[in-house]
Amino acid sequence: MIGWLDLLTEGDTHPRRFDGPASLRPYLLRIERLSEEAADALIEDGHVAPPLARREYRLRPLLSSASP
């Protein structure tokens, strides 16, 4: 089962969805232009904000609604 992650960005009402940290990290570095330190902090802690990043970012795991 895929552990989907929603990336919530300060000022953006639409989360971006990723299938895990392996696809999220390149997006953070290339598109959001976060430093490696900020990207790693977000992936590990689920939250990063200034002064480590330009704006606030949060990760929210997508809870599966399917029955086991």
Image (tube, rainbow, N blue to C red):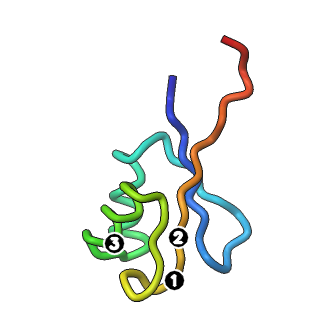
Residue 1: x %, y % from top left? 51, 22
Q: Is residue 67 left or right of residue 27?
A: right
Q: Is residue 43 left or right of residue 8?
A: left
- Amino acid at circle 3: Ala
Q: CA distance from mark 2 to mark 3?
A: 10 Å
| Badge 2 density bin: few <14, some 14–19, many ≥20, Cα 10 Å | some
- Residue 55's disc number: 1
50 up-or-down from 16: above or below: below
Q: Which mark is residue 40?
A: none
* Residue at the top extreme of this rendering: 68
* Quadrant of residue 63 within the rendered picture: top right
What's the amino acid at mark 1? Arg
Residue lying furthest front: 45
- Which residue corresponds to mark 2? 57
Real-space CA distance between mark 2 and mark 1, rounded to the nearest whole angstrom:
7 Å
Q: Give the Cα separation between the discs numbered 1 and 3.
A: 11 Å
Q: Which residue appears at 31% of the width and 62% of the height?
A: 40
- Residue under pointer 3: 38
Element under disc 1: loop
Q: Are marks 2 and 1 in contact (CB under 8 Å)?
A: yes
- Give the amino acid type for the residue marked by disc 2 in the picture: Tyr
Q: Is residue 5 left or right of residue 41?
A: right
How far from the left and from the top, in percent, is residue 34? 36, 75
The location of residue 6, given as percent across then percent down, is 59, 52
Q: Residues within 10 Å of mark 3 (few under 14, many from 20)?
A: many
Mark 1, residues whose alpha carbon is within 10 Å: few (<14), some, or many (≥20)? few
Counting from the top left corner in percent of width and height, residue 15 is at 65, 59
Residue occupying the point 39% across, 88% down = 51
User: What kind of element bears circle 3?
Assistant: helix
Kindly identify the residue that appears in the image at 57 percent across and 45 percent down.
61
Q: Residue at x 53, y 77 (%)?
A: 56
Query: Which is more N-terminal, label 3 or label 1?
Result: 3
